[in-house]
Amino acid sequence: MTIREASAQWQGTLKEGAGRLRLGSGVFEGAYSFPSRFESGRGTNPEELIAAAHASCFSMALTAILGAEGHTVNSIHTIAKVHLGVTTAGPTITRIELETEARASISVEDFERLAQKAKAACLVSRALAGVAAITLRARLAAQ
């Protein structure tokens, strides 16, 4: 089976320190910090990376499912919004919203049904099954 990796380094205290992360493929390397994670500071954060992973995984899952059902897909655009809140356990991903729009040859009803199927089948959705709510808003755009 395929193994993917990324690395992260942190120096300093939680609030004043800083880190750098790097994807194993080398296509992205960036800074992260307390302000970039819990405030509006510059840099990336784990939740943003989870959002990118979820949006891309869902888009591919939806493409595969639509194709397997014989539908032609012109494009799919997905936004994932990862909500970070505080629970009794501390900072927690409380909700993920997926918003997707596709240009495809399919009825609205079938598209919505297959989009829900893709949300359930997406590897990242399954990996994040412990998140309290993963919602989906699926929109079929005009050809």
Image (tube, rainbow, N blue to C red):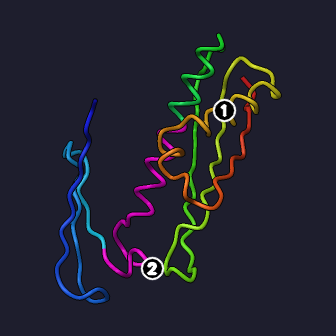
Label 1 crowding class (10 Å Cα cut-off): few <14, some 14-19, many 20+? some
Secondary structure of the residue carrying tag 2 is: helix
Tag of residue 117: 1
**Quadrant including the N terminus:** top left
Look at the picture and state if 129 lies above or below 120.
Answer: below
Residues drawn in magenta:
33-58
Residue 101 horizontal side relative to residue 24, left or right: right
**Circle 2: is it few (<14), some (14-19), or many (20+) Cα within 10 Å?**
few
Predominant SS along the magenta part: helix
**Is residue 63 depicted above or below 51 in this figure?**
above
**Residue positioned 25% across, 38% down in the render:** 3
Label 2 vs label 1: CA separation? 33 Å
User: Residue 28 location, x and y as percent?
Assistant: 26, 51
Q: Position of residue 133 (x, y in %)?
A: 65, 58
Q: How many numbered marks are there?
A: 2
Q: Position of residue 69 (x, y in %)?
A: 65, 14
Amino acid of disc 2:
Phe
Magenta region includes residue 52: yes
Q: Which residue is mark 2?
A: 38
